[in-house]
Image (cartoon, rainbow, N blue to C red):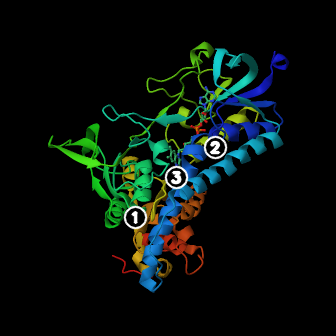
Amino acid sequence: MAEQMDFDVLVIGAGPGGYHAAIRAAQLGLKVACVEREYLGGVCLNVGCIPTKAMLHAGEQIAAARHAADFGLTFGEQKLDIAKLNGWKDGIVKKLTGGVGALFKANKVTHLIGEASFVDPHTVKVGDKTYTASNFIIATGSEPAKLPGLDVDQNVIVDSTGALVMPDPVPARMLCVGGGVIGFEFSHVYNNMGSEVKVIEFLPNIIPGADADAVKEFGKIMKKQGIKIATETKANKAEKKGDGVHVELENVKTGEKTTEVFDRVLVAVGRRPRTDGLNVQAAGVHVTERGFIPADTRQHSNVPHIYSVGDVAGNPMLAHKAMKEGLVAAEVIAGKPSEQDAVAIPGVVYTSPELAWVGLTEQEAKDKGYEVKTGIFPLSASGRAMTLQATDGFVKMVVEKDTDLLLGVHIVAPHASDLLGEAGLALEMAATASDIALTIHAHPTLGEAVLEAAEAVHKQAIHIMNK
Ligand SMILES: Cc1cc2nc3c(=O)[nH]c(=O)nc-3n(C[C@H](O)[C@H](O)[C@H](O)COP(=O)(O)OP(=O)(O)OC[C@H]3O[C@@H](n4cnc5c(N)ncnc54)[C@H](O)[C@@H]3O)c2cc1C
């Protein structure tokens, strides 16, 4: 049967999950096609990770230029060419998405343009053509969740895609509905570019999933930078009027309602898996009530030759998780003994400082029955942080009390996402806090804060008083 098929593997979606799967499958000698209906690189490259990081960098440079006065460097009045800013960001996206196309060509992955829809378990329709394959990898990703009462027009009421286009002038008053990772990254961008920003979050805490101490530290720093944060608050409705968008806010604890006026409102209340148009029913694939196509550790859906990876397969909705799952699916199809068994998937908020974590939070560790010890090293005691004008933040380490086994690392610091590589490797290698403390870290670096946090677990940090 297999030799009559058009392809060994047909991947649906060319986001991080899909293009990693397609390229790895081709590397392993399989005949591969990848169908994409909108853009190569998916959400991450086009309207997610990459353009947000470009905007964040631009915002940070603006803030850094202001802070340069602290060491005696002053410039003329700041002037932001917004058309140039948007164009610069678009240029980066174009380069990277073009790169995915080139990689497809180099690896002989057939790129099919259009929307794939299942006809039967071995056939999909793309436009007016049909293609058969021995295996399918569904990598159709996710889209922004909607909020009743706040209709996104991508102009004054935007989702993350609309928020990526900075309007001219920069909005004076910005509301961000949703205090998660995406909400805070955009709040940081707009705050640095001059907007007065307010973030509202329905839950008692911002950045759900992160360690409570780290969230507290992070929230304090964001407030210090000028971002207003209101937790246990929801937005009921928004009305566009001549002087701006009137948003009814409600304190969910007291029920008290107020109306505030903004120039731009970002709805960042999460993302939903995307399976519309895919007609998975024709292939017998199970979709959960919330729209996910769950997969086992080898990325099989309930139909063994149909795999599911990335955002559509389940949380956390992160590009690096999608990439890894794409590789696993491709390798399993090629007969390799691959499996998804990551000890830790890092999470990052790319603000300045960044909030980044890997492994268990202190609470998660306790909930799992561990007796824990923690060590915290504040950046205010780091020489390198001082030279970078970035002494807000800390490194916190969560360790099993008796064995010294590392369980989780939580960092609020510039480039925390890069510092996380060491922590991730340590977790995968089942390192102890002592292993990290015994490793010579270059001086002066922010990485030393990771070493000192490990020392602090044993109450032996050198640059702080150990309590
Ligand atoms: C603003 C923002 C910032 C983010 N920042 C980060 C970050 O810094 N780090 C991080 O790890 N993650 C980040 N993410 C999340 C990240 O973008 C996603 O986790 C990642 O893109 C998921 O990859 P994926 O391959 O599962 O799906 P997607 O990237 O969503 O790609 C799915 C692709 O499938 C296509 N498709 C869907 N249905 C069909 C069909 N029927 N036929 C053909 N094609 C179809 C879509 O057009 C799309 O291109 C961010 C997301 C957003 C919105």
Looking at the rendered structure, the secondary structure element under dot 1 is: strand
Q: Quickly name the residue at label 3.
A: 52
Is residue 132 toward the left or the right of residue 385 in the image? Answer: right
Residue 236 image point, x, y percent:
25, 36
Q: Going 49% across and 35% down the picture, which residue do you hit?
A: 143
294 above or below 303? Answer: below
Residue 96 image point, x, y percent:
68, 50
Q: Going 62% across and 16% down the picture, which residue do you hit?
A: 283
> What amino acid does circle 1 point to?
Thr
429 above or below 150? Answer: below
Q: Are marks 1 and 3 in contact (CB under 8 Å)?
A: no
Q: Going 39% across and 48% down the picture, which residue do you hit?
A: 180
Q: Does label 3 point to a residue whose CB lies under 8 Å from ligand 1? A: yes
Q: Earlier in the sequence, mark 1 or mark 3?
A: 3
> What amino acid does circle 3 point to?
Thr
Q: Mark 2 vs mark 1: give the one in front.
A: 2
> What amino acid does circle 2 point to?
Met
* Res. 414 in view: no
Q: Quickly name the residue at label 2.
A: 323
Give the Cα distance between marks 3 and 2. 19 Å
